[in-house]
Amino acid sequence: MERRRPALSGAAKTAKIITAKKQIPSDDTGFSLDSGILSLAFTRCDKCLRLTGLTRVDGCAWLGGAGGDLWRLELISPNGRKIEIGSETAMATDVGAGLSRLEVRWSFRIDGRSGSVEMTVRLEEGASLSYWSLEASPPEGWNVMRADFPMIGNVRLQENLKLAAPNGWGLEYTVGPGTDYDAVYPSCQAVMQFMALYNGKEGLYIGAHDPAAHHKRLQARAGPDGASVAFVYYAALPKEPGRFTVPFETAIGVFTGGYYAAAQVYRAFTFTAPWGKAGPVSGRPIPRWVKETDLWLRPDGNAEDNVEITKRALKYFGVRTSCHWYRWHRIPYDTLYPEYFPPLPGFREGIASLQEEGTHVMPYINGRLCDPNSTTWNDEGANRWAAKQANGDPYTEVYGSKVPLNVMCPYTDEWQAKVRGLVDRLIRECGVDGVYIDQIAAAHPVRCFDPDHGHAMGGGTFWVQGYRKMLEGIRALLPEGKMITTEENAECWIDQFDALLIVNTHTDHPPIPLFPAVYSGRTISFGFMYLPDDDLARSLPFRVKMARAFLWGAQPGWIQPFRIMAPEAAEEAGFLRDLARCRRFGHDFLVYGRFLGLLETRGAFARLQGIATGSFGGEYAIDVPAVMASAWLSETGDLGVALCNLSDEARVVEVDLPFGKADIDPSGDLLCRVYRSEGPFGAPVAAAPVQKVRLEPRSAAILAVGPKRQ
């Protein structure tokens, strides 16, 4: 990406104006950029320069108050001393403004040595987004370890202000004092690189348009005086100190609408990233059985306790079902990794027995952790492959097993070979259809400072690139018809996995389909959220999760066969069966199509309300319509509407068909076909702008709207 350095005098303290075709009003204290859609205002106060205006022309003024740092750097000296410097403590010595560009230089001193920071903001005519970049020249011998940029610290609180955060499927925060979203990318808590604030009519977008997926944090907070948003970049330390550049631009701008509109801004960027270039699911070399799966079961433990109950479930549900098998190994869960072999007695035979029933089996392994008590650690010297803190110690994490486990550096050839060997062995020796590699897209990266690993120390892209190399090696050895998946949906590996398990989304804020709004039709997902022990007994939490999985395009289920086949879960099993069977007829939309957003339904029915156990403790409230719906666009241009009745009563609902979003001319000769769990229902009817549908209790339907076909 082309980057231009400001050609400004380091001694000047008054504004220097860059020549432009049309002069932008500016003086010694005020500078502005205006595209006709977005207006940015900067104010100089003593030695500081602050962002004081961010406005949609004829729309919302997003900022209020004085603000604060636009950037902050953490510097480290050759002897390990660390110091922070920010735009409020450095001196803004030069400011240049032109028609579509603002360039600012700050200077600072540490121990008598000079350093400088240069920020560029560009805003083209007619654009709704501005693009921000940052470079720095640290004092001699110093390096940049971390760059907080850009920082917008004076977002005005307003009525009905929401935040869309890319946690898992997506979360919607109500913004007010105490709001705190702080997540490391790439991980399940920050699966994409953008956030959005919106008020019901228009919104503020901030996104790191970074096709290399550098290690960073996303932050959004609010106090009594306003809200703030920021990105924090963890730099890779160069071998020799020198000039530093934040290696990507951040887009800041405005949009009309809510989270879905913001997702479309980010979606356009993703096609420029390596993971976004893999193409649609329909054209990717994903095994056909993965694409056609409509239900996931989760055997857990030895074959003796799982095979027969799983066979009963396969017969009951009667759809293409896949199995995700946990605890198939003799070692306890989250203990002695990666010594998974030998498997429990009967595992190989159990797999073969289930495959005879037409299902496919995918066991669990972890691709990130190594137990320091394992043979791999002690006999093979895996300490050399572990990610190291600055003091040389490995990073240690503890999970439910209470066993300390060390985080491995994915950049090392040895760890890549270890995981690759596990996948190969499971396929060759056990005959599995695929392997689930836990934590890769879920757990956050760590900063590795081991000089022997061959990557730039600290941050940057080594974490992403290491796993990409590991996964490319695994894919190269996969026989035809075999697959790999992982935990969660960090975007930067979606082209390397055949499907993604998405279950870690928190329940302390309402979920929103942010991820499908960006990546539908380009990746396959299964599961929805964790299913606490009382979800089936309470019923409503289970129904809501399965309904959302269906409506948001995921393959539903991901539940232990013994739980869903228990006599007391008969109604919930029936509901899940109806969803899975209906889904068979909606693949053109829910698997291969593009998600167009959620739809409101109308009818004489109340909302469903209840309390549920949170995924990670506590409780949360449920308040949903009895009938929920979503809209989809097939690759052939047909419009699909998925509907789900969660209630125990039949419902007649009306839904407005979103012809505009689908770019369909409603005056054309269109037919609406209705599909239920057993297939087409009734004869096709003329498609009307408002479609009326009857839904039986605890059931689903799919409306397919398109031209008459021979």
Image (tube, helix red, strand yellow):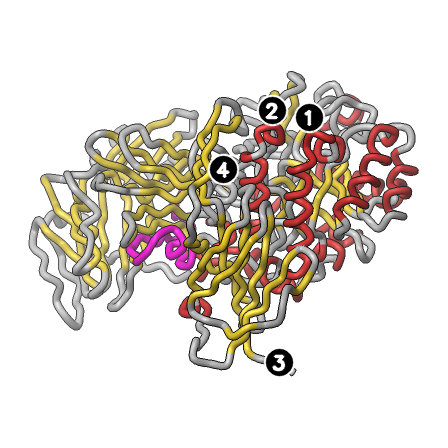
Q: Are the residues tagged 3 and 4 within 8 Å (C-beta)?
A: no
| Amino acid tagged 4 | Gln
Where residue 706 sits, quadrant-wise, is bottom right
Give the residue at x 68% y 39%.
Answer: 573
Earlier-in-chain disc, 1 versus 4: 4
Residue underneath mark 1: 383
Question: Taking 285 as reference, is 436 above or below it?
Answer: above
Quadrant (top left/top right/bottom left/bottom right) for the C terminus: bottom right
The verdict on residue 569 being magenta is: no
Point out residue 382 in the picture as x, y percentages from the top left corner. Answer: 72, 28
Q: Secondary structure at mark 2?
A: loop
Question: Taking 1 as reference, is 463 above or below it?
Answer: above
Give the residue at x 71% y 61%.
Answer: 285
Whole-number angstrom distance, CA of label 2 to CA of label 3: 63 Å
Residue underneath mark 3: 709
Q: Secondary structure at mark 4?
A: loop
Q: Is residue 257 left or right of residue 333?
A: left
